[in-house]
Amino acid sequence: STDPYECRGDRFWPSLTYHVCVKAAYTPSPHHGQMRKAPSFTFYLYRAQSAEDKYAFGNVNIANLPGVIWFVSTEVAPFCPRRHGVTRIRRYLITTQASPELFARGMNFGIRYSYDGGKCTGSHVHALGSCNRTWDRFGYVVGCNNFRDLYPYPQIPTGYLDGIWYDMPLEGRCHHATGDFRCTWSYREAGEIRLDSLEATAPGKRQCCGGSCTDYWTGSADPARCSWRVRQATKLFARKYPHLPADLPPPKCDFDRERYWDD
């Protein structure tokens, strides 16, 4: 193969037109094998997407259901045609297991980095430094942030009080998460719903696009209305996929920035 060593064997590239291989120092603790293993968690996460499958699943940001509904309500729904070409919300069954190095600090999730075009870009609003600051110390762990914490983003309160965003580094993806530096998460597809089906649950005249009108997005900052939107999405998934659990909420996003950056 002409690929550099750190890329050989990988077949899931983050883009159709190029791939990104980042070589971390990969220096687990010398006591890695004797350290206490982190627990594993299995839960649903969601991603807003267009009709195209441009990217392999990895090197992306993803969210719990309140988080993805917030994203659509602020970044997609106010625009006609829909921004980014988003037409659906995809659901994934995710299993995560932190590395022993991260778990030794009392956390199952790391800092949540931003990903753009399949590349880890750190943060648009905070000077977090290179993504290697995490990967070299803790491996390719899944990162998360609670909306309530206003760190690293969004920086202002939202109506989605329980929203959580995540990052999913492709280099940590494997068939069965073990907590090794390069095996911190795995996934399965778990269905999708279309935005037009979701909007059809609240017909109205407040917002129109492409000949269809809806009141689904009314009250974008009202916590009660935001919770209602999330419940409608949960019900729609349940009706479409009755053989699957209607909801598998994520564990606590336990990232703690003081303990995390304490060297």
Image: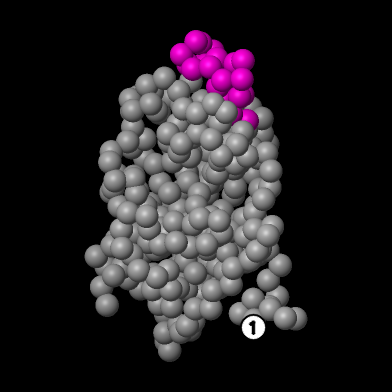
Look at the picture and state if 26 lies above or below 190.
below
Quarter occupied by the C terminus: bottom left
Residue 185 is at least partly visible in this image = no
Q: What residue is shown at x 67% (from left), y 50% (from top)?
A: 54
Is residue 211 inside the magenta stretch? Answer: yes
Where residue 180 appears, x then y in whole percent? 53, 74
Give, as a three-letter code, the residue at label 1: Tyr
Where residue 157 appears, x then y in whole percent? 28, 38
For the residue pair 4 and 45, the one nearer the viewer reads as 4
For the residue pair 84 and 45, the one nearer the viewer reads as 84
Span colored in magenta: 194-215
Give the side of residue 44 with respect to residue 114, left or right: right
Q: Which residue is mark 1?
A: 5
Where residue 47 appears, x then y in whole percent? 55, 44
Q: What residue is shown at x 68% (from left), y 71% (from top)?
A: 10
Quarter occupied by the N terminus: bottom right
